Image: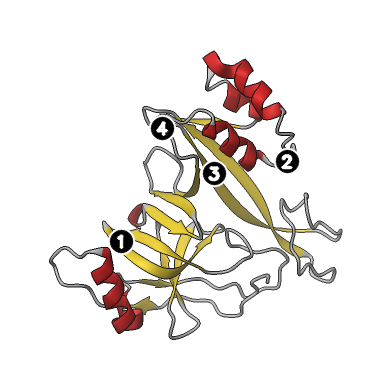
């Protein structure tokens, strides 16, 4: 369901911490189950909610909060409800006791795993522009995908490719919408990043195997607009 919410503002949410000794994942999860919201071990602003009607969503996708693990300032918190605001580039952690969520900056949140997908946070002055990136690939070479959302307006029906994604709850009488832009970076085995904008640009990162990889990927008949799958399938063939 498209998320069109009616509250805005900021509220400091003060939450409790664990004892100083090292915690095993099982101990952390047990503590979280007993303590509820207090087990989210940080303080932060209340997430911004959007008070205007708009098609699409400001979030990473339109599936809402998902269970996952999040690293915040060096500590991992398990089995919490997480989402990513792609308009402000903030990670959101939902408080189970109410409608609120805590907003976390990427420089303090380097790693997120939710619904089987991995994300990395980069702060100001780091290797990539500040924000959150989905990590594609499991080998030494990987692709980092960033989604940004922008508010635009149109009197025409712009659902689908003009927005960059499908909104299942699209309304013809709402003229503002969240447009999507995706940016991709290739990370080589030494950790260097190169922005890539096409299949050819990705293939050029493997000059010695370029023809072989192009032929193998062509046989899969991947849709032209499914760059994520193309990246994933290519990286499977280059894992080492």
Question: What residue would you read off at disc 4?
Answer: 140
Residue position for label 2: 225
In the figure, is residue 207 to the left or right of 155?
A: left
Identify the mark nearer the N-term, 4 or 2: 4
- In front: label 4 or label 3: 4
Residue at 58%, 69% in the rendered image: 64
- Residue depicted at x 64% and y 72%: 3
Which is more N-terminal, label 2 or label 3? 3
Image quadrant where one finds the C terminus? top left
For mark 4, give the secondary structure.
loop
* Left or right, 198 with reference to 78: right
**Res 212 seen here:** yes
Quadrant where the image shows the N terminus: bottom right
> Which of marks 2 and 1 precedes in the sequence?
1
Q: Are marks 4 and 1 in contact (CB under 8 Å)?
A: no
Separation of residues labelled 3 and 2 (CA atoms): 15 Å
Label number found at residue 114: none
Q: Is residue 79 above or below residue 186?
A: below
Q: Which residue is mark 1?
A: 76
């Amino acid at each position: 369901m498209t998320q069109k919410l009616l509250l805005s503002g900021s509220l400091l949410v003060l939450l409790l911490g664990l004892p100083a000794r090292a915690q095993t994942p099982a101990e952390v999860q047990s503590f979280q189950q007993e303590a509820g919201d207090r087990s989210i071990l940080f303080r932060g602003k209340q997430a911004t909610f959007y008070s205007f009607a708009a098609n699409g969503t400001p979030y990473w996708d339109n599936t809402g909060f998902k269970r996952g693990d999040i690293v915040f300032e060096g500590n991992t918190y398990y089995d919490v409800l997480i989402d990513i605001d792609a308009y402000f580039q903030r990670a959101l952690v939902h408080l189970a006791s109410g409608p609120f969520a805590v907003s976390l900056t990427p420089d303090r949140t380097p790693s997120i795993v939710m619904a089987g997908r991995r994300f990395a946070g980069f702060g100001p002055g780091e290797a990539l522009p500040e924000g959150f990136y989905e990590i594609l690939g499991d080998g030494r070479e990987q692709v980092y995908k960033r989604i940004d959302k922008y508010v635009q307006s149109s009197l025409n029906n712009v659902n689908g490719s003009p927005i960059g994604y499908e909104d299942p709850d699209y309304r013809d009488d709402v003229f503002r919408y969240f447009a999507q832009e995706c940016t991709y970076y290739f990370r080589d085995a030494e950790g260097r990043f190169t922005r890539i904008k096409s299949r050819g640009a990705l293939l050029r990162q493997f000059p010695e195997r370029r023809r072989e990889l192009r032929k193998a990927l062509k046989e899969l008949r991947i849709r032209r607009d499914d760059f994520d799958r193309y990246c994933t399938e290519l990286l499977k063939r280059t894992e080492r």
